[in-house]
């Protein structure tokens, strides 16, 4: 099948501010960061929309960091007793808005990581996902800093890395670079993340951000993710999972077709929910879509959950990319398997997936391979890290006999406050003689801030 793969690179592209600007925000993903002036008694970083002011404040005298939400006639002050106190003067302060979450951060050294100090669900008092709120949202120029910048929020980790493909399943390459979608992690679980498009020189640690994608649903802008992007003729098909407002009730898959170039810039998309065949038994949610046209028949793989979180892969076929879909089957003996990708190998088409540690013994921490009738026919020979890393594999164009895989692990970021969802480190695996011992040289956290 695919030759054995070995780890060659590990890195983490942390970037609070991705696209610099002071206004014109299209989604509730905004960041402000500043170098602190040691002589300043306090520093405030703020976002304003109409009469609403959202602020992160560092009180140097009390060695405290807090959030403030100013509304007409009321001010709400939020601090964390456990995480809001800083032992020494930090070098930097940041404020991020990620979905419905407002977070204050500090950095202790110039090259050190960001640590979340305070976090609150701001939509309890103001709906920051409303396009009307976003239209007037702007950064307030801070005073008493040694330098600052602001713009669209980027990420504290990357996960759900998915190769952008043509409709026939082959990798989309532009100017020698593959393109991938990624879930750009925020300071928490699903509703703090967004979708980014990245370009990658396959097999290397050369990965750079190119675009940001958001989705408008029910009148609000969300950071939906776990996306597959497909080039179909002259159009782009974007299939997403509706994690952006996840409240442990439901996740759906949506699809939108557009002529707009989604590989650059920032885009808010309006999609329709995909009407998927329902497997036997309960179904609480569906996610992780992957779409390929094989010999004139469209194949869609996804994950279907019996409940949160008990999930396994499914596969359907249709004559068109929008259905109606006929269920091929479901892998019923899995309870924590996701991240499916449909890939053509020397032995034929295979659905690769990722078996998480919560499966039963013998079906844990591996990359199973299924044929298009969902019969298990083997497994990818590759190291399996933490969390549920996706097996996103590509052939190398310069050495067609060799393969590379771009994936992630469960390494978290930002200290103990954000909780699950800040993962992960980016991992690059590669086959063949081109492998090297470069892991150690590239394993340190790499930041862009």
Image (cartoon, rainbow, N blue to C red):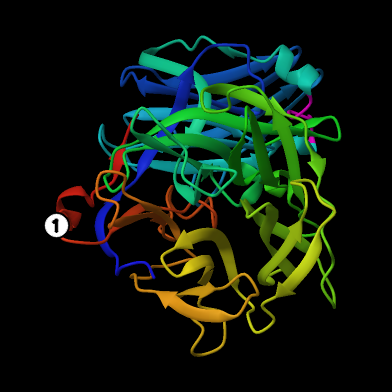
Residue at screen point 54% across, 59% down: 341
Tell me the quarter of the picture where residue 206 sits: top left
Residue 126 included in the magenta stretch of the image? yes
**What segment carries the magenta color?**
125-130
Prevailing secondary structure class for the magenta stretch in the rendered image: loop
Q: Is mark 1 on a helix, strand or loop?
A: loop
Residue at screen point 69% across, 81% down: 332
In the image, residue 104 sits, relative to residue 333, either above or below, namely: above
Instruction: Quickly name the residue at label 1.
Output: 436
In the rendered image, residue 407, in percent from the top left (x then y), is placed at 41, 55
- Residue 325 seen in this snapshot: yes
- Location of the C terminus (image quadrant): top left
In the rendered image, residue 160, in percent from the top left (x then y), is placed at 52, 52
Residue at screen point 45% across, 31% down: 16
- Location of the N terminus (image quadrant): bottom left
Residue 445 included in the magenta stretch of the image? no
């Amino acid at each position: 099948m695919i030759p054995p793969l070995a780890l060659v690179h590990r890195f983490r592209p942390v970037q609070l501010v991705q696209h610099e600007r002071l206004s014109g925000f299209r989604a509730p993903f905004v960041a402000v960061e500043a170098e602190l002036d040691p002589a300043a008694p306090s520093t405030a970083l703020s976002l304003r929309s109409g009469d609403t002011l959202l602020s992160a404040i560092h009180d140097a005298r009390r060695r405290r960091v807090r959030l403030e939400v100013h509304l007409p006639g009321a001010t709400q002050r939020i601090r964390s007793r456990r995480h809001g106190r800083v032992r020494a003067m930090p070098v930097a302060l940041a404020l991020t808005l990620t979905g419905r979450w407002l977070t204050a951060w500090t950095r202790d050294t110039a090259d050190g990581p960001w640590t979340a100090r305070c976090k609150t669900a701001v939509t309890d008092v103001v709906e920051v996902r409303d396009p009307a709120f976003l239209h007037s949202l702007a950064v307030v120029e801070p005073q008493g800093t040694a330098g600052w910048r602001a713009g669209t929020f980027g990420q504290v980790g990357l996960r759900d890395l998915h190769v952008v493909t043509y409709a026939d399943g082959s990798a989309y390459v532009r100017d020698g670079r593959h393109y991938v979608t990624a879930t750009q992690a925020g300071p928490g679980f699903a509703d703090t993340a967004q979708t980014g498009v990245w370009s990658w020189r396959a097999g290397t640690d050369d990965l750079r951000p190119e675009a940001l994608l958001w989705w408008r649903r029910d009148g609000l802008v969300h950071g939906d993710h776990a996306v597959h992007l497909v080039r179909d003729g002259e159009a782009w098909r974007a299939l997403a999972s509706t994690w952006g407002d996840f409240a442990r009730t439901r996740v759906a898959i949506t699809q939108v077709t557009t002529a707009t170039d989604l590989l650059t810039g920032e885009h808010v998309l309006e999609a329709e929910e995909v009407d998927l065949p329902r497997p036997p038994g309960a179904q609480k949610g569906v996610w992780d879509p992957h779409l390929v046209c094989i010999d004139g028949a469209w194949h869609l793989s996804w994950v279907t959950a019996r409940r949160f979180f008990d999930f396994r892969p499914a596969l359907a076929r249709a004559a068109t990319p929008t259905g109606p879909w006929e269920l091929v089957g479901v892998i019923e003996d899995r309870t924590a398997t996701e991240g499916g990708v449909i890939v053509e190998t020397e032995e034929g088409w295979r659905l690769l997936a990722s078996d998480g540690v919560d499966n039963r013994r013998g079906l844990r921490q591996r990359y199973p391979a299924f044929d298009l009738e969902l019969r298990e026919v083997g497994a990818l020979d590759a190291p399996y890290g933490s969390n549920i890393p996706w097996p996103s594999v590509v052939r190398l164009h310069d050495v067609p006999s060799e393969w590379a895989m771009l994936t992630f692990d469960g390494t978290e970021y930002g200290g103990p406050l954000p909780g699950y969802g800040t993962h992960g480190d980016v991992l690059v695996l590669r086959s063949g003689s081109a492998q090297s011992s470069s892991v150690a040289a590239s394993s340190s956290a790499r930041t862009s801030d």
